[in-house]
Image (spheres, rainbow, N blue to C red):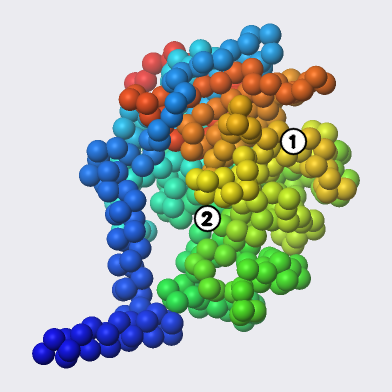
């Protein structure tokens, strides 16, 4: 009887292995169960609401711990991060004091999210990508769930039901560009070599163009545009033994979008005003798309590893957040900020973390060039923002703020942007 039972178990195991290899029933159920078990093992404290996965251990003191008034670019810092038990957007002064907050839970912003297969609890929702507008309104992404615009009093003005994430570029026209996922189950003939994986689908990364009233007026497929641009060799580089795409659900991982503004266009002879800079993390690729055809007119892979947030600079260069993603052990070293000349593809300046001044975030991360030449850096998974003063005698940290949430913990920060006094005229105005 024992040998019979052992044989049944062995047969079930072998059938399960075969189903997983062939992608047949019940492989999807088995993979989902394995993923759920792994997620629970890693995040059980989060799901039991003992300690959020968005709060990380830190040996740094919370608040603004460095402040050199002679070296910084003064102003206010617009932040999205985990604080007071949930993700929110907030504005801090140079001392780290919260001056204003946009606090709204996903369930409040979206009481009936019919566009979602499953609705996560509020404590599991992050904000990833936000834009502060002149009147104090904020457009923000509930990551993977939808984009909302709220006024300065956190009241919802409009909603976009889409799988949005990572970034929002607020255009001078009043429109917005936002990265989004579209679940693809049947690639068409215009996507040669693209097939769905064993899950039965993959994410087609798209650029959403949203108008000032919150309507999606265009959705551009990046898979389609890469293939139309003749970049099959780049797109299929990760396909291992199979020269097709589809062995992973998220082949591109599109994580940033930015339009080249008119006032900077003259510095970029390779590009034109309105061209679009994108970052595709899983290909270690940044690219510039033509403003009309959305075909790739320039691209570069590496030396960055799993990068984020490439920015156009007034001097004709690009600034890139190089995560050097290597897991908790930092297998590729500390994270870096790189300034790259797109004409020569040469790194002309860089800042790298060190044992003396650690700087590393495995995922996420942003930077901002400030008007005085300093660089504001968002070290996401350390819950830290710092201002790097660049000079002929070297670079140094002139301001630092840690999103302390108590008990040796820092709340994850997904974005920080320094804004001047001309953009915070809404402060102190009452809400009615």
Q: Which residue bears the numbered disc 1?
A: 350
Count the labels in the image: 2
On screen, residue 419 versus residue 161, left or right, reads: right
Q: Is residue 207 visible?
A: no
Q: Is residue 364 above or below residue 244?
A: above
Picture residue at 80% right of the left edge, 58% below the top: 297
Dot 2 or dot 1: first in sequence order is 2
Q: Residue furthest top?
A: 70
- Distance from disc 2 to disc 1, alpha carbons, whole Å, reads 30 Å
Residue at 52% across, 55% down = 180
Would you name the residue on which mark 2 appears?
180
Disc on res. 177? none
Residue 244 percent location from the top left of the image: 62, 78
For label 1, the SS is: strand
Please, which residue is most extreme toward the front here?
Answer: 3
Q: Are marks 2 and 1 in contact (CB under 8 Å)?
A: no
Q: Quadrant of the N terminus?
A: bottom left
In the rendered view, does 385 fall on the left or right side of 2?
right
Residue 342 at what x, y percent from top left? 82, 47
Circle 1 Cα neighbour tier, 10 Å, few/some/many (<14 / 14–19 / ≥20): some
Which one is in front, 214 or 416? 416
Which of these two is toward me, 173 or 176?
A: 176
Name which quarter of the figure residue 85 lies in: top left
Quadrant in which the C terminus appears: top left
Residue 335 screen position, x and y as percent: 62, 40
Residue 366 position, x and y percent, is 60, 37
Q: Secondary structure at mark 2?
A: strand
Closer to the camera in the image, 263 or 1 = 1
Q: Tag 2: Cα neighbours inside 10 Å, few (<14), some, or many (≥20)?
A: many
Residue at 30%, 67% (x, y): give it. Answer: 33
Residue drawn at x 73%, y 23% is 395
Mark toward the viewer: 2 or 1:
1
């Amino acid at each position: 009887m024992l040998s019979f039972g052992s044989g049944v178990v062995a047969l079930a195991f072998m059938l399960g292995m075969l189903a997983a290899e062939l992608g047949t029933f019940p492989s999807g159920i088995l993979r989902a169960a394995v993923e759920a078990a792994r997620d629970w093992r890693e995040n059980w404290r989060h799901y039991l609401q003992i300690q959020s996965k968005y709060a990380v251990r830190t040996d740094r003191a919370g608040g603004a711990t460095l402040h050199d008034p002679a070296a910084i670019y003064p102003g206010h810092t617009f932040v999205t991060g985990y604080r007071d038990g949930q993700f929110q957007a907030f504005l801090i002064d140079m001392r780290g004091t919260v001056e204003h907050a946009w606090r709204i839970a996903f369930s409040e912003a979206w009481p009936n999210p019919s566009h979602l297969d499953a609705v996560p609890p509020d404590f599991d929702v992050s904000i990833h990508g936000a834009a502060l507008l002149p009147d104090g309104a904020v457009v923000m992404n509930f990551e993977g769930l939808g984009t909302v615009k709220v006024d300065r009093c956190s009241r919802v003005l409009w909603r976009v039901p889409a799988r949005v994430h990572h970034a929002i570029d607020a255009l001078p026209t009043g429109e917005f560009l936002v990265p989004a996922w579209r679940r693809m189950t049947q690639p068409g003939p215009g996507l040669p070599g693209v097939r769905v994986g064993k899950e039965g689908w993959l994410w087609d990364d798209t650029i959403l163009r949203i108008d000032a009233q919150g309507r999606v007026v265009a959705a551009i497929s990046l898979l389609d545009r890469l293939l139309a641009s003749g970049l099959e060799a780049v797109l299929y580089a990760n396909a291992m033994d199979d020269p097709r795409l589809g062995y992973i659900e998220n082949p591109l991982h599109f994580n940033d979008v930015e339009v080249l503004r008119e006032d900077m266009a003259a510095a970029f002879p390779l590009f034109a005003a309105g061209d679009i800079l994108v970052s595709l993390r899983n290909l270690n690729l940044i690219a510039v798309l033509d403003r009309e055809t959305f075909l790739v007119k320039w691209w570069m892979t590496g030396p960055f590893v799993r990068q984020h947030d490439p920015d156009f600079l007034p001097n004709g260069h690009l600034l890139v957040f190089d995560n050097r993603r290597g897991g908790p052990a930092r297998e590729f070293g500390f994270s870096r900020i790189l300034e790259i000349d797109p004409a020569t593809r040469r790194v002309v300046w860089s800042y790298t973390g060190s044992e003396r001044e650690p700087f590393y975030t495995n995922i996420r991360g942003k930077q901002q060039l400030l008007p005085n030449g300093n660089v504001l850096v968002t070290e996401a998974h350390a819950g830290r923002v710092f201002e790097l003063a660049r000079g002929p005698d070297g670079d140094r940290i002139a301001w630092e703020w840690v999103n302390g949430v108590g008990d040796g913990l820092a709340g994850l920060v997904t974005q920080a942007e320094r804004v001047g006094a001309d953009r915070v005229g809404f402060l102190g105005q009452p809400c009615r």
